[in-house]
Structure formats: structure tokens, C-alpha cells
Image (cartoon, rainbow, N blue to C red):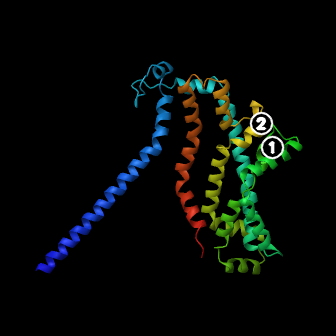
Amino acid sequence: MEGQMDLNRTKQTDRARRTAGKVLTYAMLIFWALVVLFPFYWMVLTSVKSYSAYNSEYIPKLYTLAPTLENYVEAFTAVSLGRYFANTILFTVVTTALMLAVTVLAAYAFARLEFRGKNLVFTLFLSLMMIPTELVVITNYVTITNLDLRNTYSGLILPSVTSVFYIYLLKENFEQVPDQLYYAAKVDGTRDLKYLWKVMIPICRPTIVTITILKAIECWNSYVWPRLVTDDEAYFLVSNGIQEIRENGFGRENIPAMMAAVVAISVPLIVLFLIFRKSIMAGVSRGGIKG
């Protein structure tokens, strides 16, 4: 009887420890979520405050009783925010499409095709990841300038149509597809491009979707390169447009309107991530598993 009581007490103690651990874990997660989300909440809150209400607050308030959308109207009418959106959508779509084509073909070549020096070439290719980004930006800037491609969509797009990391990620994913499928397709007379299109791409779709979404986000947030190669407002992206708003628009004085412009720019990426978050997680985890 005493042994049974001791066993029950041990089980209760273990259960209490697990419960306390879960409570502590969720408390830490909730706290960290609040810390991460608070800047975005503050940005949205400021964007729906009127200019006079914002300036009259000696102590910032965490709420507003009179939200307004006038700041969003001003964000799209006082500056060329609509044009910046159009430029960014064009830049993102074209760059992502070209990058996807280059990445899929390069990854397939390294994963399935046999040619002399393949391993050496791929090793040298990976070594490019060790080069600091600043050096690549400098050489790309010199090249684009010498080709007279500044203030053009070609100058914006061409340096971003490849990624060593995405090629490596997709190559690892392609190599997980059994070799027997490839040999069987070759016996049936299937060409490599058809095998890539009919077999490899459908099987590795989660990783390809992940690469596509991550590249789209990267393009949307691009700042340094567009700032270097464009000084004509007609080619500004939203990231550069925000800087233009701050310098020559209403940003230095009308903070609520500035926040409204930032919210409008951020919403598409948030929606994109929420829609494809499961595909992104599945693609990243799949790309990191061998066998």
C-alpha cells in the first residue's frame, strides 16, 4: 500500500513539473510574441491617429478612440506611392521568374547531369557564398554603370536573377529523388527537360514554392541595390520610395501619414507569408533532410 502511495505521489509530482514547464514555456512565448509584435502594433496605431491627435499627445497612448483613414489617403495622394508599388510589383515578378528558371536549371544540372569537373565547379560555386555582399555590390555597380544600364529595369533586375544558396537548397532537394526514376525515364527515351518538368518539379514543389516566396520577399524589401542604380523617381521601388517620402515628402513632419505608407507597403508581404507559411516551413524542412 505504501509503495502504491509513493508511486502516486511520484506521478503527481511529475505531472506538476510538466504542467509548470508548459506554463513557463507558454508564458515565455507569449511575452516574446508581444515584444516582437508591439512595433507593428504601434505602427498601425500611429497610422490611424489624426495628425493633430498625434501631436497633442505629450505621453504616447496605446489606443485611440477616434481612428481615421485620412493618413492612408494622404499617403497615396501626396506622393507617388502608387507608382512605387507598380515598379516594385514589376521588379519582383520579373526577377523572381528569371531567378526561378536559372535556379531550377542549375540545380538540376548539378544534381542529375554528369560532366567533367562537376564537383570542382560546384565547390567553386559554393565558395562565392564566402564573398562579402559589399564586394559583389561594388562589382555589379561598376558593371551596370559601364553598360549604361543605370535608371533602367534591366539594371535593377539582372544582378538579382541568381542565388547560390537557392541553387544549393534545390540541388539537395533534387538529389533526394530516387535515381531509379531517372534511369527508368532515360530507358523510355525521356529527355532531361521533360523529366525535369514532369517528375522533378512536381516532387520538389514545396521547396520551389519556398524559394519563390523568399525571393519575392527579398525583392520587395530590396533597398541598397535600387538606391545605388536609380536616382530617377520613375524607377523607385517602395523601399526607396519610403526614403524619398521621408526626405522630400511629408515624413519628417507628418509621422502618422508616414506610418500609413509603411503599413501599406508591409501588408502585401504579411498576407503573402500567411497564405504560404505552411509551404515555406515544409520546403525549408524538406530541403534540409537527406535520404
Say which residue appears at 81% left-offset and 43% top-offset.
155
* In contact (CB < 8 Å): disc 1 and disc 2: yes
Say which residue appears at 65% left-offset and 48% top-offset.
218
Label 2 environment density (alpha carbons within 10 Å; few <14, some 14–19, many ≥20): many
Residue 182 coordinates in the image, percent (x, y): 71, 77
Q: Amino acid at mark 1?
A: Gly
Q: Give the vertical position of 74 relative to 103 (above or below).
A: above
Left or right of 159 in this view: 43? left
Q: How many marks?
A: 2
Q: Quadrant of residue 184?
A: bottom right
Report which residue position mark 2 lands on: 230
Say which residue appears at 69% left-offset and 45% top-offset.
92
- Give the label on residue 132, or none: none
- Between 124 and 199, the one lying in front of the other is 124
Q: Amino acid at mark 2?
A: Thr
Q: Secondary structure at mark 1?
A: helix
Residue 163 coordinates in the image, percent (x, y): 72, 57
First of labels 1, 2 by sequence position = 1
Say which residue appears at 66% left-offset and 64% top-offset.
169
Residue 254 coordinates in the image, percent (x, y): 56, 23
Report which residue position mark 1 lands on: 155
Left or right of 26 in this view: 260? right
Residue 260 coordinates in the image, percent (x, y): 55, 30
- Between 132 and 110, the one lying in front of the other is 132
Pick out the residue farthest to the left.
1
Quadrant where the C terminus is found in the figure: bottom right
Q: Secondary structure at mark 2?
A: loop
Quadrant where the N terminus is found in the figure: bottom left
- Between 217 and 32, the one lying in front of the other is 32
Q: Quadrant of residue 251?
A: top right
